[in-house]
Image (cartoon, grey):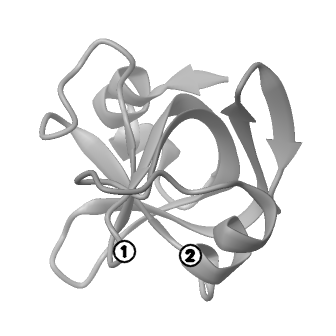
Amino acid sequence: MYLVEELIENSRELMGKKVEVRGVITHNGVICKLNGYDEKVDGPSIEILQDELLKTLFGKVPAYGGGRYLYHDNARVIGTLARSQEGNIVIEGVSDLTVEFEGKEIKVI
C-alpha cells in the first residue's frame, strides 16, 4: 500500500499497474482527487476517474454542506495507475474505494 506522495514518486515504475493507495479524498462536485495526509488539498494529488463516482458517494457517505468540498475524508483506493489525456497521474478502473467517516469505514465501491 502506498501513500499519495509515494505513489507519485514511484509512478514511472507503477504506471499501468493495479495499486492500493491511502490519502484524503476530496470531491468538489466535478473533480475527485486523492490528496496526501500532510498536504494542503491544493498540493500534489491524484485524480480518481470513475464513472458515476459522485452519485455512488452520495448513496453511501453523507456529504458536507456549505464548504468548498462535498467530501474531505480519509480513504483507501485500489485501481490502475494511468495518465490522463493531459498527462496527469490518475487512478482509473477503481475496484475498491473505502472512506472513513465519523470513525467508521464505509465501502463505497
Res. 2 image quadrant: top right
- Whichever of callouts 2 and 1 sits on the residue coming sooner in the sequence is 1
Other residues around mark 1 within 10 Å, as few (<14) / some (14–19) / many (≥20): few
Quarter holding the C terminus? bottom right
Which residue, given by chain and number where applicable, does mark 2 sit on?
54
Give the camera-side residue of 1 and 41: 41
Residue 7 lies left or right of residue 83; in this view the side is: right
Dot 2 lies on which element?
A: helix
Give the camera-side residue of 4 and 66: 66
Q: Amino acid at mark 1?
A: Gly
Residue 45 lies left or right of residue 100; in this view the side is: left
Other residues around mark 2 within 10 Å, as few (<14) / some (14–19) / many (≥20): some
Residue 24 lies left or right of residue 2; in this view the side is: left
Which residue, given by chain and number where applicable, does mark 1 sit on?
29
Quarter holding the N terminus? top right
Which percent across, then down, holds residue 33? 38, 54
Which percent across, then down, holds residue 35? 35, 36
- Marks counted in the figure total 2
Residue at point 17% right, 26% down? 40
Residue 27, above or below 107: below
On residue 81, the disc is none
Residue at point 70% right, 33% down? 101
The answer to whether marks 2 and 1 mark residues whose Cβ atoms lie closer than 8 Å is yes
Res. 77 image quadrant: top right
Residue 44, above or below 94: above
Q: Amino acid at mark 2?
A: Leu
Residue 85 lies left or right of residue 71; in this view the side is: left
Give the camera-side residue of 11 and 60: 60
Dot 1 lies on which element?
A: loop
Question: Spatial distance from mark 2 to mark 1, Cα to Cα?
Answer: 7 Å
